[in-house]
Amino acid sequence: MLDAAADLLLGGRCAGCERPGRVLCGDCAAALPDGAFPAWPSPVPPGLVPPWAAAPYDGLVRSLLLGHKERRLLGLRRPLGGLLAAAVGEAVAGCVPAGPVVLVPVPSRPVTVRARGHDPTYTVTATAAQLLRRAGRDAIAVRLLRTRPGLVDQAGLDAAARAANLAGSLTCPAPALRRLARRRAAGSVVVCDDVLTTGATAREAQRALDTVGLHVAAVAVVAATARRRTPTGPRF
């Protein structure tokens, strides 16, 4: 309600259709998907755990992700968190036994977070965890990963360049593990991100967590690019 009032006072528009008023109008909200699908990259990075996405990265969902990330339309965290929660739910149903679920967001570079003025991936992941708890699932979002110096922006890089840029770029510091131990003695780990492209980022996050003894059960994202295909189905 507060987001809607602020948007009206400031002349806001729907991030999906540009209709004046709320940051997401009722028609666009109703058009959002309510499930998720396996989002295997093509080619698949060796060893990648099952990735799930709530939507293709185009149209309405792409507009919402860009609005939240680049334009600081913070009211979009709820619908985007709902999409991520749906992807986590499918991942959990498919390959994770019932029990606590630890959602680990892929970190952005500190310079990028400072430039944007917020951390969109963590915000959406934390919102997804909150929604899962409301639905009765024991879920928490924990910042376990950090970026190493030297990581550059992935935009514009091809699959090989992304893999080279990301190799060894993420780490899981001991203090983060201690914080997790205080909150949960055990839990299935799901790596979370906004968009899955080549799968290189997700695989690097998985590697960093595996290195410290945390088994990653799945990857969940809001959206996957059109490079995706299911193992048994056509490219979408």
Image (cartoon, helix red, strand yellow):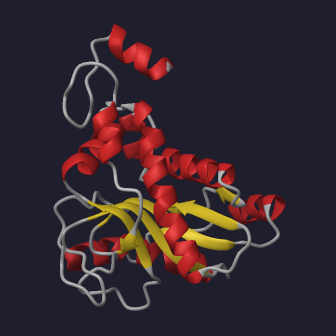
**Considering depth in this image, is 99 or 25 the residue closer to the camera?**
25
How many numbered badges does the structure rendering display?
0
Above or below: residue 7 compared with residue 50: above
**Considering depth in this image, is 47 or 223 the residue closer to the camera?**
223
**Considering depth in this image, is 186 or 116 the residue closer to the camera?**
186
Relative image position of residue 7 (x, y in whole percent): 36, 17
Above or below: residue 82 compared with residue 216: above
Relative image position of residue 43 (x, y in whole percent): 24, 87
Above or below: residue 25 compared with residue 84: above
**Res 155 visible:** yes
Q: Quadrant of residue 181?
A: bottom right
**In this rendering, would 129 be left or right of 18?**
right
**In this rendering, would 215 be left or right of 60?**
right
Name which residue lies at 67% across and 67% down: 101
Name which residue lies at 19% across and 50% down: 59
Relative image position of residue 208 (x, y in whole percent): 54, 76
Quadrant containing the C terminus is bottom left
**In this rendering, would 141 be left or right of 81?**
right
Q: Quadrant of residue 58?
A: bottom left
Name which residue lies at 61% across and 62% down: 144
Relative image position of residue 191 (x, y in whole percent): 52, 68
**Res 168 visible:** no
Name which residue lies at 19% across and 28% down: 18
**Considering depth in this image, is 123 or 174 the residue closer to the camera?**
123
